Image: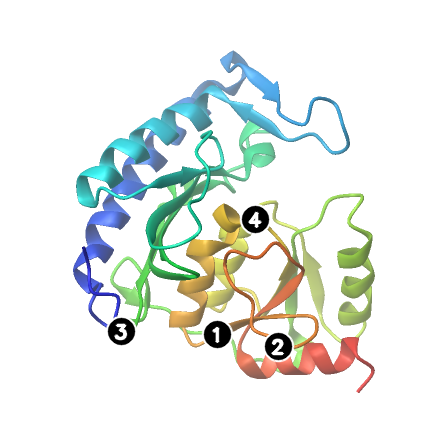
Amino acid sequence: MPDSNPGRCTHLRTPVAEAARQAGQVLAEFSRDVHALTVTDKSGGQGTMDVVTDADHAADRTLRRALTEILDVPYVSEESEDVDPGAGLRWIVDPLDGTNNFLNGMPLFGTSVALVEDNRTIVAAIDLPLLNETYSAAAGDGAWLGDTRLQLSARPMRSWLIEAATQPDSAQILGNLMQLVAGARAVRILGSIAISLCWTAAGKLDLFLGDGHSWDVAAGMLILSEAGGETRLLDGQFRSPLEHAVSLSGHPDHVRQALDRLNGR
């Protein structure tokens, strides 16, 4: 098992990124004919549709095989029936993040992989196959797009491009977004939390507002933090990647300014 002290998981970053790329190529193949896919509504018709496709399952099988060869620890996936053991080392993955984009022929989707120890991520990779972008990070070793180290935006609030992860019924997020955008430049809703966190880490976006389950955020939060960013709950506390709660992610100064605005300071 790897030593999770800072900088000691570096040797896992490359093989984990390769596993993510393998799953990304599976998604890319399926994306050529999305109309042929079997699509199932996991929500059972209750509330906002939560769908799963043949592509999710195929990418999930690819990831399980590749990751357990790297490190044979529990494997937790959005599409699996496994239960997160809650402690120790385990893989937490989303084989297809951005499913609705994928089904509509949009290239904003990918696969997200995190190696989590207890309540923190120690290795992460996110592959965006149709954009030819693979992001990766290991605790204490920085965040990377391929061989390029990521750098956060330091733009002033009036120039911010704010990204939100929201559904039509996400009243809290929409309300907070309206407060923030009043002092910023523009808003984007990309439909993929993995992309949102990676692009914030890379300085393409200035601030991310959203929630997400562990498989949505565990990889992206490490990539963001290793680029020098942070993720905080709306009460100012640091967010764990295992929490499902609304939070802000970005440059620490950006997060502080956003919290001040939301709290009327």
Residue to which mark 2 is pinned: 255
Whether tag 3 and tag 4 are in contact, CB under 8 A, the answer is no
The circle drawn on residue 213 is: 4
| Mark earlier in primary sequence (4, 2) | 4
Q: CA distance from mark 4 to mark 2?
A: 20 Å
| Mark earlier in primary sequence (3, 4) | 3
State which quarter of the image contains the C terminus.
Answer: bottom right
x%, y% of residue 142? 31, 71
| Mark earlier in primary sequence (2, 3) | 3
Residue to which mark 3 is pinned: 6
Q: CA distance from mark 3 to mark 1?
A: 16 Å
Whether tag 1 and tag 2 are in contact, CB under 8 A, the answer is yes
Foreground residue, 49 or 190? Answer: 49
| Type of amino acid at the residue the image marks with label 2 | Val
Name the residue at 16% across, 60% down.
Answer: 11
| Type of amino acid at the residue the image marks with label 1 | Gly
Whether tag 4 and tag 2 are in contact, CB under 8 A, the answer is no
- Disc 1: CA contacts within 10 A as few (<14), some (14-19) or many (>=20): many
Q: Is residue 127 visible?
A: no
Q: CA distance from mark 3 to mark 4?
A: 25 Å
| Image quadrant in which you'd find residue 261 | bottom right
